[in-house]
């Protein structure tokens, strides 16, 4: 299995609810990043959390990182229909090349 | 808009055709990347260019040929492709040492 794996693969919620997505990885990382992708379009960078950080906030997004468990979670609070997209975690193993390893993603559907 | 522009957005080509994908960024980034996104598979890194030099070739078949004439432009030349090469091809750029990547909208390639 690959370095980053998101869980669940698909998530369907009602507008206003919170959405939690998890990511697990296997090797030591320099940082972990979350991206969003609307159907068939490019990825949009959401948030980066470094290996020495445990929690980070950005607007309605909250990311946690547990390096002992090699896992991260992305929480979207008060979800909106516009949050409907696929969410990917990407692990950066370090080095100057910026080689990110992506998981398969979680497909989030927010129903109005 | 992320500052990374890819053209064309859609491309249909026959297996004997030769075509090129173009990526352009004016973010002042020094590293540029090609990724391949196939259905139900994780995003796959194909090539990395750092300061116009190719620093990573992730075992990509020779029918894909990248070119980086300057730090703002990246091309992917395609020839004698196979139907299984049909995918979304994403270009990204980042600063040399900071791995936050900015992605283009992608080129949806269909090989017939």
Image (spheres, rainbow, N blue to C red):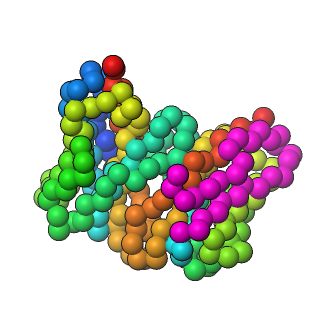
* B8 falls in the magenta region: yes
Quadrant in which the C terminus of chain B appears? top right
Which residue sits at x=71%, y=69%? B67
Q: As drawn, is A71 to the left or to the right of A42?
A: left
Residue A100 image offset from top left, x and y in percent: 42, 60
Residue A17 image offset from top left, x and y in percent: 21, 27
Which residue sits at x=32%, y=45%? A5
Residue A18 image offset from top left, x and y in percent: 20, 32
| Residue range highlighted in magenta | B1-27
Residue B41 position (above or below residue A101): above
The reply to whether residue A107 is in sight is no
Q: Residue furthest right?
A: B16
Residue B52 position (above or below residue A61): below
Which residue sits at x=48%, y=41%? B41
Which residue sits at x=27%, y=21%? A14
Foreground residue among B32 and A97: B32
């Amino acid at each position: 299995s690959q370095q980053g794996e998101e869980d669940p693969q698909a998530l369907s919620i009602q507008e206003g609810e919170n959405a939690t997505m998890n990511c697990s990885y296997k090797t030591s990382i320099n940082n972990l990043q979350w991206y969003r992708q609307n159907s068939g379009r490019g990825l949009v960078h959401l948030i980066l959390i470094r290996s020495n950080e445990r929690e980070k906030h950005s607007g309605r997004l909250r990311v946690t990182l547990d390096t002992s468990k090699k896992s991260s979670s992305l929480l979207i609070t008060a979800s909106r229909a516009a949050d409907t997209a696929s969410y990917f975690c990407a692990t950066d193993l370090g080095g100057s090349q910026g080689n990110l390893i992506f998981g398969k993603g979680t497909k989030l559907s927010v129903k109005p | 808009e992320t500052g990374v522009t890819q053209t064309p957005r859609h491309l249909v080509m026959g297996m004997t055709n030769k075509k090129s994908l173009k990526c352009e960024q004016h973010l002042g980034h020094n590293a540029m990347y090609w990724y391949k996104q196939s259905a139900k598979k994780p995003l796959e890194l194909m090539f990395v260019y750092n300061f116009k030099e190719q620093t990573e070739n992730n075992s990509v078949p020779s029918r894909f040929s990248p070119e980086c004439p300057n730090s703002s432009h990246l091309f992917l030349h395609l020839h004698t492709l196979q139907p299984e090469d049909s995918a979304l091809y994403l270009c990204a750029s980042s600063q040399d040492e900071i791995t936050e990547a900015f992605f283009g909208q992608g080129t949806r390639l269909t090989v017939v």
